[in-house]
Image (tube, rainbow, N blue to C red):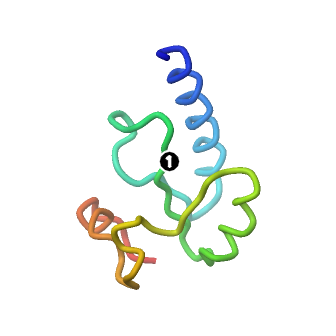
Amino acid sequence: MKKDNERIKKLRDELESELIKIEGVSVNGTIENRLSNTSNLSFKNIDSESLMIALSKNIAISSGSACTSASLEPSYVLKALNVEDH
């Protein structure tokens, strides 16, 4: 299980390292203390629906959390992390 976790973490890190090369893409939250199988990214000035359609064939993706799915308001978690509302 530890070996799988390390492999997944490496894949996540590789994905993020390529994505943050794109202008306006950033990782939300801490880089050190987080789940190895999850990325939380912001894409400035990119339509979330278009992004989801383009990426959802290869990875599981959402434009928000389950706890804010009925709201158009920005996530309270991202607000707490001082993530700018795009």
Q: Secondary structure at mark 1?
A: loop
Residue at the spot 74% in from the left edge and 51% down from the top edge? 58
Residue 75's spot in the image, x, y percent?
34, 71
Q: Residue furthest bottom?
A: 72
Residue at the spot 40% in from the left edge and 66% down from the top edge? 66
Residue at the spot 35% in from the left edge and 65% down from the top edge? 83
- Establish if 48 lies above or below 55: below
Between 31 and 4, the one nearer to me in the picture = 4
Q: Residue furthest left?
A: 80
Which residue type carries mark 1? Ser
In the image: residue 11, left or right of residue 39: right
Between 71 and 44, the one nearer to me in the picture = 71
In the image: residue 33, left or right of residue 12: left
Residue 62's spot in the image, x, y percent?
54, 64
Query: Circle 1 sits on which residue?
Result: 39
- Establish if 36 lies above or below 56: above
| Quadrant of res 82 | bottom left
Between 25 and 63, the one nearer to me in the picture = 63
Residue 43's spot in the image, x, y percent?
55, 66
